[in-house]
Image: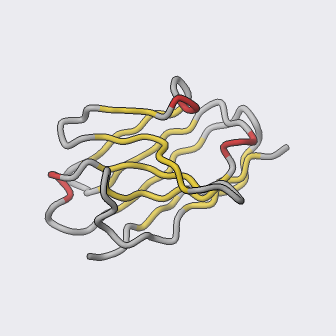
Amino acid sequence: QVQPVESGGGLFQPGGSLVLSCAVSGSRFNIWTMAWYRQAPGNEREMVARITPENNLAYADFVKGRFSLSRDGAKKTIYLQLNSLKPEDTGVYYCNTWPYWELPWGQGAQVTVSS
């Protein structure tokens, strides 16, 4: 399997917004539940949000109401809109399948929220 390619990270101010993208190659994209994961410094990797092939969504409690996940089957890409950023959103964001990590981990997208 080819690594996902995450993009869109950077340095953002508290209260700001951004969109992360994750491009996934492979013919099985449209049957996978895809998820965004986050690893903050010193912490375990945790799931942020996930989306089924039928576009059913689930979010971690710490991002509900602030983050929005979508997918584009034609582009084999998932997107994560992050709003109302908080310093604790800082971390490296990765995408992979859920619940089992079927893809190799990509480079991730570093998101730093700081004033």
Quadrant location, the C terminus: top right
Marks counted in the figure total: 0
Q: Quadrant of residue 15?
A: top right
Which residue: 56% across, 61% down?
109
Which residue: 26% across, 68% down?
25
Q: Vertically, is 69 above or below 41?
A: above
Q: Give whichever of 62, 53 is nearer the camera.
A: 62
Colouring style: secondary structure
Using residue 84 as the reference point, say whether residue 97 is left or right of it: left
Q: Vertically, is 105 above or below 97?
A: below
Which residue: 71% across, 58% down?
41
Using residue 101 as the reference point, say whether residue 106 is left or right of it: right
Residue 101 x/y as whole percent? 34, 62
Residue 89 x/y as whole percent? 66, 43
Residue 82 x/y as whole percent? 56, 38
Q: Vertically, is 23 above or below 48?
A: below
Which residue: 58% across, 32% down?
62
Query: In the current view of this chain or complex, which residue is farthest to the right?
Result: 115
Quadrant location, the N terminus: bottom left
Residue 43 x/y as whole percent? 65, 55
Query: In the current view of this chain or complex, which residue is farthest to the top?
Result: 65
Q: Give whichever of 113, 47 is nearer the camera.
A: 47
Q: Give whichever of 75, 102 is nearer the camera.
A: 102
